[in-house]
Image: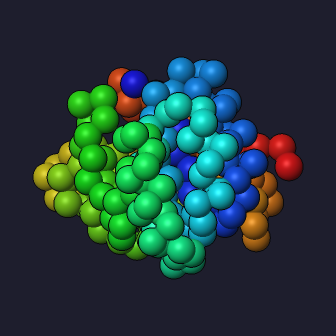
Amino acid sequence: MKICIVSDSHDRGPMLATAVEIAKAEGAEAVIHCGDLIGTNTLKASLKLGLPIHAVHGNNLGDLVALAKLSCKSDGLLNYHGRDATITLGDKRIFITHYPHYGHGMACTGDYDLVCCGHSHEPLARQQPNIKAGITWLVNPGTIAGLGAPAATWILGDLATMHFDIRTLAR
């Protein structure tokens, strides 16, 4: 199963939708958003593409009530989890948070196959040794908005092969 991993869209809905559209064309079946959505307008174009979106909030919360209402009215396309989330996609246990330090700590537990985080606006995809003598993938897609970063970035992940490709989006 392929997934689109994004973060820090900061109300840049068209850039988010472009990444989701590219990922969908390449076989993605779901989207993980690691926070800093800001508002519902950020998601509307992406939701029209028909992929389920799993989102958490970050430090730039925006209108939580409006996001919760949009989630309720989305026929299951928007799963707005709040501060963090544990989900299963493609038989992989995934933890989603906004904060890299929290993500690193959760990766170290060995309870997850993949931990996704955001906030730093710096993309990374690496294997993190965990306390169960295994590894957990820790990924941060950077910022799809490109704010305070050299480029707008996102990740196309393949859960079958556990391969995570950092992508750049033209601005």
Q: Position of residue 19 (x, y in %)?
A: 67, 40
Q: Is residue 110 above or below residue 77?
A: below
Left or right: 30, with 10 as reference point: left
Q: Nearer the viewer, residue 113 or 1?
A: 1
Which quadrant is the N terminus positioned in? top left
Q: Position of residue 104 (x, y in %)?
A: 36, 65
Q: Is residue 80 above or below residue 66?
A: above
Asked if residue 151 can be seen in this view, the reply is yes
| Residue at x 31% of width, y 35% of height | 89
Q: Nearer the viewer, residue 73 or 142?
A: 73
| Residue at x 40% of width, y 40% of height | 75
Q: Position of residue 8 (x, y in %)?
A: 61, 63
Q: Position of residue 107 (x, y in %)?
A: 30, 58
Asked if residue 122 can be seen in this view, the reply is no
| Residue at x 38% of width, y 53% of height | 72
Image coloring type: rainbow
Total labels drawn: 0
Left or right: 10, with 147 as reference point: left
Q: Nearer the viewer, residue 46 or 88?
A: 46
| Residue at x 27% of width, y 47% of height | 87
Left or right: 153, with 160 as reference point: right
Q: Quadrant of residue 22?
A: top right
Find the residue positioned furthest to the left: 132
